Image (cartoon, rainbow, N blue to C red):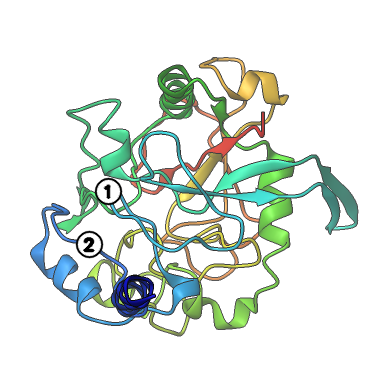
Amino acid sequence: MAKLKIYFAYLLSISVVVATILGSGVALGQGVVWGDKEVVKRLTSKRIPEDQRATLPGVQTAPVGTQRPLADGGDEGFTVVSSGCVNVQGRQVCVSNFLIGVHEVTNAQYRNFVANHSSGGYRQQNLNLNVQPVVRVSLQDALRYAQWLSQQTGKRFRLPTQAEWEYVAHSQRVDISNVCSFANVGDLTAKNTVNNSWTTADCEDGYGVAAPVGSKAPGQFGVHDIIGNVWEWVCTDNVNKCAVASNNIAPVARGGAWSNGPGSYGADAVLDVSASGRQRSPIIGFRLVQDPY
């Protein structure tokens, strides 16, 4: 009986330690090299609510909703989107079950595929931090990344179809008049630090260019930055063609970016890159979906 009491006391002490660690609210771990010590210091020095914690490269965090770890080591989370329909400008958009990345693909993740990729900068503002969304990638680059990741993991990753992207974006139920609270768009910060001639939202989101993924609170499905931060390549063809590189898919991006002012961002915002899907821009990135089989 004495040994049993000691055993239970040991278990209780472990529980207290674990609870203390999990309850600390620190979203980021040790040993993550991002290339910007100030960003690390700013994000690690404050408590972040559990439902707003970012799952960043090399960092394990508490799951959001039904978030699952990505097969490449947990660098990114995917959340389950159940089948359903949503009204989009008077038409019904319906989807089957799929999983969508809660964050845009980051520079760090993309460099697992193309080691020397640089997202560069814009007017002396850095776009190349590991935690920022990858940009200067074409539609074909995004498709190739999805194809490569599928080959590496044995699971199927692809770009979201327009219907899937719209379903998630229109399910966010956000107040666009309060855009700076949930999205990184063309705002007073960008106007003051990047281009003072821009027409911007009359608020400050704190970022002149692309923000580290997950900096803003998530929406309905635990998805961050579906509006703003960077335009996201989507697939305008059927799902089977969204998983392999192809020159036959119309180059379309959705959502708006850090440079876009009122009227050019949101769930209905469409960027038709009609010149070529090979275009690489400082305001276009992507996120992935995963097929649930």
Front-most of 268 and 152? 152
Tell me the kind of residue under disc 2.
Gly
> For residue 29, which numbered disc appears in the image?
2
In the image, residue 38 lies at what x, y percent?
12, 69
Front-most of 200 and 76? 76
Q: What SS does tag 2 mark?
A: loop
Q: What SS does tag 1 mark?
A: loop
With respect to residue 98, does 291 lie above or below? above
Looking at marks 2 and 1 on the same chain, the residue that comes earlier in the sequence is marked by: 2
Give the Cα distance between marks 2 and 1: 8 Å
Q: Residues within 10 Å of mark 1 (few under 14, many from 20)?
A: some
Q: In which quadrant will I find the N terminus?
A: bottom left
In the image, residue 50 lies at what x, y percent?
45, 74
Q: Quadrant of residue 29?
A: bottom left
In the image, residue 264 lies at what x, y percent?
56, 61
Residue that appears at 85% across and 45% down: 94
283 on left or right of 252: left
With respect to residue 47, does 255 lie above or below? above
Residue that appears at 62% across and 26% down: 250
Q: Are marks 2 and 1 in contact (CB under 8 Å)?
A: yes
Residue that appears at 39% across and 57% down: 55
Q: In which quadrant will I find the C terminus?
A: top right
> For residue 58, which numbered disc appears in the image?
1
